[in-house]
Amino acid sequence: MKMNAYIAGVGMTKFGKHLDKTLKGLAGEAIQAALADAGLDKSAIQAAWMGNAAAGVVTGQEMIRGEVVLRNMGIGKIPVVNVENACASSSTAFQQACAMVSAGFYDIVLACGSEKLYHEDKSKSLGAFSSAVDIEDPDGAVNVVKRIALEIGEPFDASTVGVNRSIFMDIYSVMAKKHMKKYGSTKEHFAMVAAKNSFHGSMNPRAQYQELMTVEQVLAARPIIDPLTLPMCSPIGDGAAAVIIVSERKARELGLARRIKVAASALVSGWDFTEPGESVGALAAGQVYEAAGIGPQELSCVELHDASAPSEVAAYEYLGLCAPGEGAQLIESRATYLGGRIPVNVSGGLLRKGHPVGATGCAQIVELTEQLRGQSGKRQVEGARIALAHNGGGAIGTDAAATVVSLLIKEQ
């Protein structure tokens, strides 16, 4: 969908383990930072889209999550839309907020994502992920793993699925094996992704993990499920991110010195594929490139959904950063490192920045906005002008249940 909206302010918390902070506190911190960045008072917000995925499971807060956050800040009366769309919750909130501004309904709106996944009872944290599949399917999430495993001739033992780990790691495991068998990628290639993102994350003060890791250290780390080791899997986390979005008229009125335009954003859901090579990510990316009249070769940087290291390799291909089957060669060439042809996940990505699922989508927008403004310090992409965010959520069949891709442009 073609958009005509501008980003006036961004803010986010440090991602990590925040047992001493509330969901309201984290979201409020990010929103206050975004308002300060925009130079606006909270009274200027005309509507809000509030993304969260797991509060009902982890904290028990259901139904009015956004209103609870905003009332705690003294914000009332305005329309508040609560958005729950698995890991794509706040990217969906962002996409819908931009659409409403582009359509002319509002001049100043808020998109926010927040999440608390850490809990003293670890089963609650893991339980948040087990519901992001079709639970009315008799085999639930197991069926997702089973379908892919049977497709590639891998042995399948349902009794081990999701044991002491998120069910999604089992899904990423069989997806990785599928890519390895089809294209010749290796465990070493996936370790390269984790090492690259650790390099980027080491320069990000808001990242959950800032330790630098080598490929050898990634490979030697604790195994989770073959071929994944711990650093190849995104961690759970707590955090929040917020974006103030304004109309073109309001951007002129505010005299924004650094005009970051939301040129296009697409929200798509999965379907039963009939053609080889189809994917939710490819569909969303294609819609965005067409709407903006921009090709992947014109991108300056990308923040993509690396919930696992193999996920990043696959995303290189369906986002058009390289040809199908060439994702392993792309990471091997170091093209996706800072300073390379197309830097990817310079924030550290989900693997190192962290993955408080409901906050992830807006956090990607925060990172890319700062990159386009030239505010990213040691991890600044030189001359960044066009940036793409990709965020997927949930699983049905053999792909994501929902995906959002957004394209941002720095206006001259």
Image: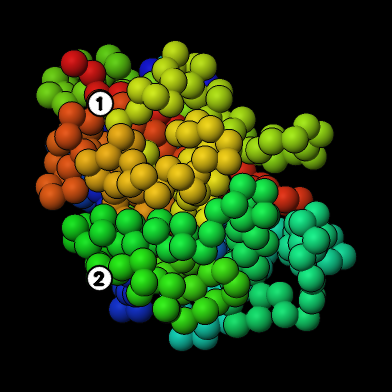
Q: Residue at x 17, y 42 (%)?
A: 380
Q: Residue at x 78, y 32 (%)?
A: 275
Of residues 326 and 224, which is closer to you in this image?
Answer: 326
Classed neighbour count for the residue bearing mark 1: other residues with Cα under 10 Å, few (<14), some (14–19), many (≥20): many
Q: Is residue 159 above or below residue 28?
A: below
Displayed quadrant of residue 163: bottom right
Q: Which residue is mark 1?
A: 385
Relative side of 226 to 377, left or right = right
Amino acid type at circle 1 is Arg
Of residues 131 and 276, which is closer to you in this image?
Answer: 276
Which quarter of the rendered picture does the C terminus lie within? top left
Of residues 35 and 199, which is closer to you in this image?
Answer: 199
Residue 409 percent location from the top left of the image: 30, 24
Cα distance between the residues tagged 1 and 2: 29 Å
Displayed quadrant of residue 40: top left
Residue 211: mark = 2
Residue 91 percent location from the top left of the image: 46, 42
